[in-house]
Image: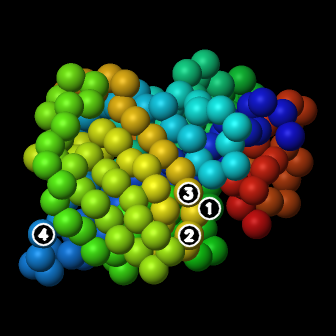
C-alpha cells in the first residue's frame, strides 16, 4: 500500500467516525446528558488523526456543514478528498490528479471506527481548552472499555481518544478551528471530473485501492 493509500484510508476512517458521531447525538436527544456532536454552524477544522494500527498520526482538513449533514475531508497535499452525505448515506472519493471520482453506499452504513455510538453512556468530566477553544470533557463508557472526548457547546469535536462500541482504538485532536460559510460546491465532485465505477479500471496512479474503497 502506498503512502497515499494509507493516508486516504485514515481520512476516510475519520470521516465515517465524524458522521456516525453526528447521527448519535441526534438520536440521543432527550435521553440524558450527552455532548452535541453535530456542529451548529459551518466550520473547518484541521485535525491530527490516528486510527487504530496507523503508526503515525496524519493531518486532515475537515469541512462541516451546519448540523453535520455533510462533511468533506482533504489530505494536506490536496491529492484526494472524501465527501460524506449522511442523509443520503453515500461516500464520494475524489482523486484530483487523475480528475476522477467514485461514489458508493457503504455496505453496513456510515459506521465509526473509534468515536461515539448509540450504545455508549456519557458522563461530564469538566472542561478543557483545545486549539484555543473551550470544550466540555466527557467520559464515555462502552462494553469494550472507556474513551474521552472534548466537544464545544456548539458541537465541534476538538479531541477524542479511546475505545468505541466495536472495541477499536483511535484518537484525534483539533489543531485549528475556523468558523465561516462552507460552499455547497465543496460537497460535490467537480463537474469536469470523470466518474468511475467498480467495473471500470482506475487510471494509473489513481490512488485509493485499500480497504476504504467500495466492495
Alpha-carbon span between mark 1 and mark 2: 26 Å
> Which color mode does the image show?
rainbow
Label 3 sits on a secondary structure element that is strand
Q: Which residue carries the number 2 mark?
A: 167
Res 102 seen here: no
Q: Nearer the viewer, mark 1 or mark 2?
A: 2
Q: Which mark is residue 104?
A: 1
Q: Residues within 10 Å of mark 2 (few under 14, many from 20)?
A: some
Label 1 sits on a secondary structure element that is strand
Q: Which mark is residue 169?
A: 3
Compared to residue 68, the image places residue 63 above or below, namely above
Alpha-carbon span between mark 4 and mark 3: 24 Å
Earlier-in-chain disc, 4 versus 3: 4
Q: Quadrant of residue 4?
A: top right
Task: Look at 24% across and 56% down and name the residue there.
Answer: 138
Decide which of 34, 184 is in the foreground and name it: 34
- Cβ atoms at labels 4 and 3 below 8 Å apart: no
Alpha-carbon span between mark 3 and mark 2: 7 Å
Number of numbered discs on residues: 4
Compared to residue 23, the image places residue 68 above or below, namely above
Earlier-in-chain disc, 1 versus 4: 4
Decide which of 184, 111 is in the foreground and name it: 111
Q: Which residue carries the number 4 mark?
A: 33
x and y percent of residue 155 in the render? 19, 49
Task: Look at 43% across and 32% down and name the residue there.
Answer: 47
Q: Is residue 163 left or right of residue 43?
A: right
Amino acid at each position: 500500500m502506498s503512502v497515499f493509500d494509507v493516508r486516504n484510508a485514515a481520512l476516510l476512517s475519520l470521516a465515517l467516525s465524524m458522521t456516525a458521531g453526528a447521527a448519535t447525538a441526534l438520536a440521543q436527544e432527550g435521553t440524558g446528558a450527552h455532548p452535541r456532536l453535530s456542529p451548529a454552524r459551518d466550520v473547518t477544522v484541521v485535525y491530527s488523526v490516528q486510527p487504530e494500527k496507523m503508526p503515525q498520526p496524519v493531518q486532515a482538513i475537515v469541512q462541516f456543514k451546519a448540523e453535520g449533514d455533510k462533511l468533506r475531508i482533504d489530505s494536506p497535499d490536496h491529492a484526494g478528498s472524501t465527501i460524506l452525505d449522511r442523509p443520503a448515506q453515500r461516500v464520494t472519493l475524489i482523486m484530483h490528479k487523475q480528475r476522477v471520482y467514485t461514489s458508493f453506499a457503504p455496505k453496513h452504513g456510515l459506521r465509526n471506527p473509534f468515536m461515539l455510538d448509540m450504545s455508549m453512556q456519557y458522563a461530564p468530566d469538566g472542561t478543557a481548552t483545545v486549539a484555543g477553544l473551550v470544550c466540555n470533557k466527557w467520559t464515555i463508557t462502552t462494553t469494550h472499555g472507556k474513551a474521552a472526548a472534548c466537544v464545544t457547546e456548539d458541537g465541534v469535536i476538538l479531541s477524542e481518544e479511546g475505545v468505541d462500541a466495536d472495541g477499536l482504538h483511535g484518537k484525534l485532536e483539533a489543531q485549528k478551528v475556523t468558523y465561516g460559510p462552507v460552499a455547497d460546491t465543496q460537497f460535490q465532485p467537480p463537474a469536469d471530473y470523470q466518474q468511475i465505477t467498480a467495473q471500470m479500471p482506475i487510471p494509473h496512479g489513481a490512488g485509493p485501492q485499500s480497504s476504504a474503497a467500495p466492495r
